[in-house]
Image (tube, grey):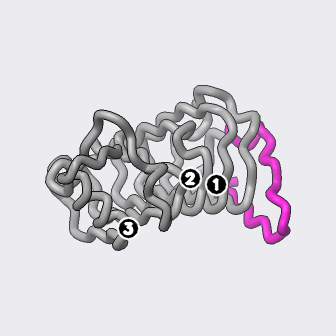
Amino acid sequence: PEELILNNSDRIPYCVPSCIFSCPKLIKVHISKCICKTVPTALEGFRTLRDLRLFQITFESPVQITLPKLAILCINRCWGVRWFNISCLRLKRLSFCDNDDLELSHYINCSELILARIWLLNGVVEHHRQNERISLTKLLSPWPSLEYLGLNGDYLKVTRDSFMGWYFS
């Protein structure tokens, strides 16, 4: 199969088996309300993946993945995002909404990005990091092809506050 859609409608998150991450022919993966406990540290199985959408996923261990063909990435309402290190230089659409961490450094070099949507949770304190600043100019300069940018008020507040000494990445 070329698609994997795992939509857990149960109240209890489903624990995703690690074998899912070794399917080399997948083009589209949509997973919701799951826990990824035993993900291999370096994933090699998703070389053809073009569309990855994660909703309410909990990452409990580090994941390093290179997705050379990925064009669409949605990471929404996920936890443990700091563990998810992804390289996807051909990314065209990025949705990064209501996660427990704001780690955009993995996506900053996506020069083909045409759409970016970045929303923070209401409590933005956990998004601040020591010795790092970002402004809209710094965020947008590596994205010359960007046609649409969606930011919520909490993100704009943190960006504004970064000029007043707040730090985050």
> Residue 83, how many percent across, how many down?
56, 37
Q: Nearer the viewer, residue 125 or 20?
A: 125
**Vertical comparison of 61 with 27: above or below:** above
> Residue 56, how many percent across, how many down?
65, 60
Q: Say which residue label 2 marks.
A: 27
Within 10 Å of the Cα at label 2, are there few (<14), some (14-19), or many (20+) other Cα atoms? some
Numbered mark located on residue 57 in the image: none
Q: Nearer the viewer, residue 45 or 6?
A: 6
> Residue 80, how many percent across, how many down?
60, 44
Q: Determine the residue positioned at 63% across, 39% down.
A: 24
124 to the left or right of 156: right
**Vertical comparison of 136 with 129: above or below:** below
Q: Say which residue label 3 marks.
A: 154
**Hey, what amino acid is under mark 1?**
Glu
**Hey, what amino acid is under mark 3?**
Asp
> Residue 131, how many percent across, how many down?
29, 34
Is 18 contained in the magenta span?
yes
Going from N to C along the chain, the mark reached first, 1 or 2, is 1
Which portion, as a residue range, is magenta?
A: 1-21
Tag 3, which secondary structure? helix
Q: Determine the residue positioned at 49% across, 36% down.
A: 85
Within 10 Å of the Cα at label 3, are there few (<14), some (14-19), or many (20+) other Cα atoms? some
Q: Determine the residue positioned at 81% across, 48% down.
A: 15
| Residue at the front extreme, as displayed | 164
How far apart in space, not on screen, are marks 3 and 1 (Cα)?
Answer: 37 Å
